[in-house]
Amino acid sequence: MEKSFTNEIYAYALENAIEHGKTMANVVLPKLFQHGLKKESIKDVISEINKVVSEVNSMSSEDKIKLIGNYKKFLKEKVIEEKGLKELPNVRKNQKLVFRMAPFPSGPLHIGNTKTFLLNALYAEKYKGKILLVIDDTIGSEEKALILDAYHLIPEAFDYLKVKYKKPIIYKSDRLNIYYKYAEELIKKNKAYVCSCSQEALRENRAKKIECACRLLKVADNLERWKKMFNARQGEYVLRIKTDMKHPNPAFRDRVLFRISEREHPRVGKKYKVWPLLEFSWAVDDYLLGITHAIRGKELMIEGEMQNYIWDIFKWKKTNFIYTGLVKLEGIAGKLSKSKSQKEVLRGEYSGWDDPRTWSVQSLEKRGILQESLREFVENIGLNQNDVVAPVDDLYAINRRKLDSDSNRYFFVENPVELKIENFPDVKEIKVKVHPEKPKLKTIELGKSIFVSNKDFNDFNGKEVRLMHLFNVKLDKKTRFTSMENNPGIKKVHWVSQGVKTKVMMPSGAWAFGLAEKSIEKLKKGEIIQFERFGFCKYQGKDKLTGEYEFWYTHN
């Protein structure tokens, strides 16, 4: 190897670790090509990269920040990419744009479906337009049931995200008579009919591209049948729109616009039993509410096509649809699903709608994910009709950047092991910075016992370690003091003395139990701090039953 890349390796390893908590060799290696590394020399540097990565990952956040100052001159200046939302199609000069957010209230918003709603809000802000919150609470299906709690959880989430939607909130369950009016107009135009055919007969007719007998009835007969629907049994009738039975997409042929449901609605009870499907209610509402642009998932393309078909019948002005692909969040255990979370909450398997496993906006807020981080995360994903994979670590990196300069540092040891230290030096207290970049000091008083985590005790058993900011010891069943000298060559271990019982709710739904330094007793509820070498956590207050100080884990 003609040139040494040691300085550059440290520079990029530290930079990446500070931003993401940890670094990896496959992140550092590509950076070295900017400094002249040849492909044929990769084998010469890879062992050194692995060594530095391991060393950097074992450092405290404070040490990383201190050390990177020595290597900043070896970092190539980053090319600043243009950020923000790209321009929307079909926007006229000085046009007043109106967007909508239309969540289905089967549960709280989660990190996945929030993306599309938030994009509508961000574009409304970009164009100084208006954003409406329309609770899309048509009856839905038995598999995807409406939940009363969602009626307050959804606005609560948008309020946290600082979305300035126009008040009052619009509920589709208040607009049934409006939908009935336009359904009758379609029947009078001979563009819709009431069908009593079975599903099997319909499928056969679609396959054969032929009309059913119901479709051939006169307008007067269909209006009479329409009246009968309101007293009929579930499944007895549906209202269908007349389309081309030879349409290339069988699913587009004579789609259902209204159906009968005898299930109780959580908001309006059994006041209505004839309910519109999504495309009809939105065809009417997008027009009446003056929606100019709607960003929606590409899985709704056929519904969009049907809305256009209905608008053509009424000769109404059309909404511009912008379709976006699905986002798969990498690094999340299991599938994001409101229906699944609903079942887990109702069965009592989750602690509530803010259980971290729901990934609801409420759970993210409780963990310490800032609203501005969620907004930036969504903006960075942007509009893309292709399905994309978005690592949840990207969200964490954004949030970490916003938290790092303000979050004070504390010690926490999980599954503590008590050290019996021989020749304990005459040290009664130490003063430590609350944050590496703040002058403020905190006083840590020492008692007779020192506790370290069970993991550190096992990993470094028989070895000399540095108790952070304190002194050096050799870990063993009979741990003994070795030196006051801060030797950079030995591992640093966090510890607690005179600690208080603490528990941390992890994203998996499991608790981490341990001891934290007494300084946390002065924290205010809702404060986000960093337990060094453990992660950022949000303080929830003292558990009245157990007396433990409760935190929720944010990220590393």
Image (cartoon, helix red, strand yellow):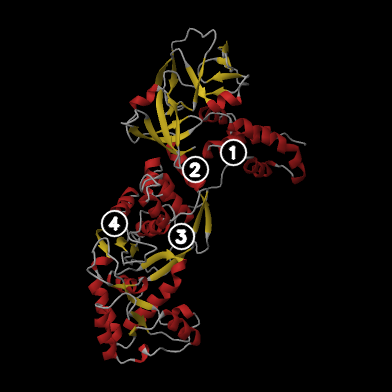
- Residue 166 location (% of width, % of height): 26, 59
Disc 3 residue type (three-letter) = Lys
Disc 4 residue type (three-letter) = Leu
The residue indicated by pointer 3 is 86
Please, what secondary structure does the residue beneath circle 4 have?
A: loop
Circle on res. 397: 2
The mark closer to the camera, 3 or 2, is: 2
Distance Cα–Cα, label 1 vs label 3: 31 Å
Residue at position x 41%, y 49% in the image: 358
- Residue 242 location (% of width, % of height): 38, 85
Please, what secondary structure does the residue beneath circle 3 have?
A: loop
The mark closer to the camera, 4 or 1, is: 4
Please, what secondary structure does the residue beneath circle 2 have?
A: helix
Distance Cα–Cα, label 1 vs label 2: 12 Å
Pick whichever of labels 4 and 1 is earlier in the sequence.
1
The residue indicated by pointer 1 is 23
Circle on res. 13: none
Give the position of the N terminus as an image quadrant. Answer: top right
The mark closer to the camera, 3 or 4, is: 4
Q: Does any portion of residue 440 appear in the rendered image?
A: no
Few, some or many C-alpha atoms within 10 Å of disc 3 (few <14, some 14-19, many ≥20)? few
Check the image and report above or below for 371 versus 144.
Answer: above
Pick whichever of labels 4 and 2 is earlier in the sequence.
4
Residue at position x 36%, y 82% in the image: 241
Disc 2 residue type (three-letter) = Ala
Pick whichever of labels 1 and 2 is earlier in the sequence.
1
Few, some or many C-alpha atoms within 10 Å of disc 1 (few <14, some 14-19, many ≥20)? many
